[in-house]
Image (tube, rainbow, N blue to C red):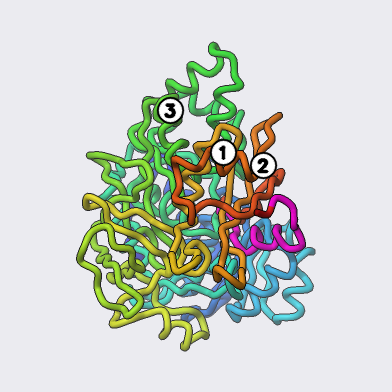
Amino acid sequence: MPVLPLLARAEAHGTATALRCSAGTLCYDDLLAGARLVAAALLDGGTDLAEARVAFLVPPREQYVHTQWGIWLAGGVAVPLSGAATAKELAYAVSDSQAAILVTTRDRAESVQPIVAATHARLLVLEDLPHHGVTALPEISPDRRGMMLYTSGTTSTPKGVVTTHGCIQSQIESLVHAWQWQADDRIPLFLPLHHIHGIINVLGCGLWTGAAIEMFPRFDVPTIFERVAADAYTLFMAVPTIYVKMIEALHAMPPEQATPVVSGFAKMRLMVSGSAALPARVHEEWTALTSQKLLERYGMTEIGMAISNPYDGERRPGAVGQPLPGVEVCLRNEAHQPIDAENVAGEIHVRGPTVFREYWNRPEATRDAFVDGWFRTGDIAVVEDGSYRIMGRSSVDIIKSGGYKLSALEIEASLLDHPAITQCAVVGLPDDTWGETVAAAVVLAEGESLDLESLHAWCRDRLSPYKMPRTLLAVEDLPRNAMGKVTKPAVSRLFAGDSSNVE
């Protein structure tokens, strides 16, 4: 019998469709049967993995769920690895997590042999599992560790974020309630499954409610559009770059092809954007195209989702809404004092059962991440008319120039209104006089050109003089991580040695 609420619910869903993927259509009973086989192989005659870390490098299909659930059934801690990670990155995660077992598929087995040899982890190949399950499984209490996800490491060495089973359940239940998940929901899943967006927001919520999830190895516009036109989905969750790509694709399609796709999007009950800031222009253009008002939310690996625009009510472009059910949120100043007034910027602090337990083997980092029991997110926000608006990361998106604290996201939002700019990233560059100066890396529309002088002329009525970029760099693409987030340290490096277009 399943020993965790998520798996108990899966048993109750029984023969309902759970997944559609390259392996075909699978019901909840199929997922549980596969999970029991994985659990038996992991236990290997034992009775409880006792929170041993199990790293797994598995494609986004039924094998992923079999492995995740099998690890939990056996009492282990699931450590999902990125399929796009380099050998060095994979080795780091397996070594840092002290994984006792590495689960993968036959086609990846040879490539991970050096990692297995270096870490002495036991290798388990899914296609070679014995075809028998176990009769006894350990009891898993909510306070036991259940999952470890690695941070992106854009500002420091990646850290293992440890969540308990109770935390995972709280994150799922909060979103199921807020976004009104139903058993008849259908949703595509093309987001990376080593990231909380794909694992919790889509896979976890969908399988909790008995919904049907269609899994794809990656996001592909023609494939997704074909399914959307067929009215395959009621829900859709993606990152801003995907919405930008879909807008471009819809504009490029002849009307007779675009119309059924637009109709398919319009019929969905909810479309969500997250993992990076959604430019107001994209929000408004998507609404104009599909009549859908995107729901933007705010979260991170350590806290799951914390703030969301409402399911029913105004979804304001540029805002992320109010705290989710079961989540406490407050803003604090640099002295860690609460900020009660609106329109005063402060760091977002979060408290509640959705917050992670610890950074793996980093007690000092864990201690420093909390103040009076509140987790310090490092993100700066203001409350405007009752709704939170994210200004950026305190470390990379707040530029301290000439005594001002400038929001890189605010400047980016203004620059994205320029007709020649399709993408942009703003960073602060060190300056002896000003402390930091504003620098903008931009991707220009095809056939467009832009210099600093003309940009300043355009910005004059849109940005205060001290917010205007002092350095401008045109690039073909902005550096991004697997979730589509621009990596600001990499953007800063683009300016190294570049002396053109400097005022």
- The structure residue drawn at horizontal position 29% and vertical position 50%, both measured from the top left corner, is 321
Magenta segment, which residues?
A: 485-501
User: Is 5 on the left-hand or right-hand side of 204?
Assistant: left
**Disc 1: which residue:** 24
**Disc 3: which residue:** 265
> In the rendering, which numbered label is found on residue 271?
none
- Mark 2 or mark 1, which is nearer the start of the sequence? 1
Q: Amino acid at mark 2?
A: Asp
Task: Count neighbours of disc 3 (C-alpha within 10 A) and say few if under 14, some if 14 to 19, many if 20 or more.
Answer: many
Q: Is residue 134 visible?
A: no
- The structure residue drawn at horizontal position 41% and vertical position 33%, both measured from the top left corner, is 284
User: Is 92 on the left-hand or right-hand side of 163?
Assistant: right
State which quadrant residue 331 falls in.
bottom left
Q: How many marks?
A: 3
Q: CA distance from mark 3 to mark 2?
A: 38 Å
- Mark 2 or mark 3, which is nearer the start of the sequence? 3
> In the rendering, which numbered label is found on residue 451?
2
